[in-house]
Image (tube, rainbow, N blue to C red):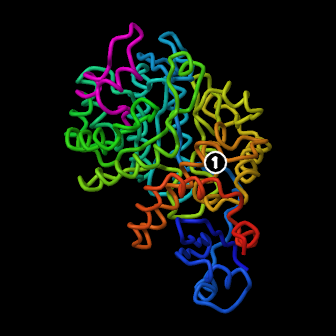
Amino acid sequence: MPRVFVVPVCEEWLVYAPLERVTAAANSAAVAELSRGEPSRLREALAGTTEAEPRPREGPVDPQFFGIVPTRACNLACVYCGFGSSPCAERMAPQLAVAGVNWMAGHAARRGRTTLDVHFFGGEPFTAFAVVEAAVERTRSAAAEKGLATHLEVATNGVYSEERARFAGEAFDKVVLSVDGFAEAHDCHRPFPGGSGSFNQVARTARVLSRSRAELCLRICVAGDNVEDLPESVAWLCEEFHPSSIDFETLQPTPESERAGLRPPDPYVFSVRFLEARRAAVERGVDAIYAAALTEKPRLSFCPVGNDTLILHPDGRLSACYLPESDWQARGMDLDLGRLVEGEMELAPAAVERVRTLVAEKPRCDACFCRWSCAGGCHVNHSYPGCSGAYGSFCIQTRILTACSLLCGLGLTSLADELAGSRESMERLALWPSDRLEDWGARAGG
């Protein structure tokens, strides 16, 4: 029998078999027939082609992209930032970044790829502009030498000169720009070290980028203070800056955010407001993305961890994650993979296998219908080793939004709206103890 999940949606049931690519809405009688193994239309649908269950990677390391953290330094003092950024943080030597690009170019060519894919993270990458500039130039020249196209991507706060914004728009294929909605919320979340607001500079950068060749993606950190404004702020951001997409991430609590009195949004409120914001974005031709609710392809991980991604840090360390090492260690994790020394990748095979295995070991996710779409969320913050027990806020909102996305995919938008319009129905779905079909009768009283 295929792995089938069943979750309650108001008076109906959502039946989901991700490996068979089967989704259906059914009443209790139809689910009871399915659970007893009786012939039915649902059982016939489940008899089709089945994809292999996602498994950890095997064989030689094959990065999905090469990541560079030029520095942990930052020119802002975001009140929720737990990256430990400071203006005097270490900068990467430009030649180290170039050596990493050279390795990735050679690897891409040997693997028969068509694109050299390099991403930049921080801190704020542009506070180490010489590193970024050198790595971008080398990516272009190395790609030309190997007959590859380039894909350059950067995550940035947008706080720099107009000239630098024009550089970003011309040098990069995709720019992920952090802007937390209207000016009041953004300036509260993302001030300068002295306390003044950064919104005006970010808005100027967004306008430059919106006129450039780069794909502009806006990223919103949603907290308790800006969740209610999501639909209106998203409509405004779409009309003002014309992004291709907006990515929504809820606040991950840190000591810094606690001191600032900032809290994550209520997951039920976030779910409702996100759906409203997504509708506003789609009406304006913009994708609204909550990454944990994407269901296009079964996966074990929705982030670099477990996907063989190599991320180069300023000191030459190579890791699977761009978060600070202290965050992993606090969860009892080790995501280091090796070092880049004198242009040579020194990868530890045991470390690679450890990280590959990590993404398949998520006890709390085993009975959840999102196990191969959400894939546990962030492995450091949401599904770290030993994580078990009741669903947390991230799980709650992800379960609701995944169900709504699946319903909309069936053309049942009205049922998705009915679910989002009832706190009781959302709670029943979000807190349903086991979504496995074999547990359905005991849970549903059947």
- Inspect the magenta stretch and tell me whether residue 182 lies in it: yes
**Viewer-side residue, 61 vs 270:** 270
Quarter the C terminus occupies: bottom right
The residue located at (23%, 24%) in the rendering is 162
The residue located at (25%, 22%) in the rendering is 200
**Viewer-side residue, 39 vs 196:** 39
Quarter the N terminus occupies: bottom right
The residue to which callout 1 is attached is 308
Q: Position of residue 276 (x, y in %)?
A: 35, 50
Choose top left, top right, bottom left or bottom right for residue 22: bottom right
Q: Position of residue 117 (x, y in %)?
A: 46, 46
Q: Which residues are magenta?
A: 176-204
Determine whether 47 is above or below 313 in the image: below
Q: Position of residue 164 (x, y in %)?
A: 28, 25
Neighbour class for label 1 at 10 Å: few (<14), some, many (≥20)?
many
Determine whether 258 is above or below 44 in the image: above
Determine whether 444 is above or below 33 in the image: above
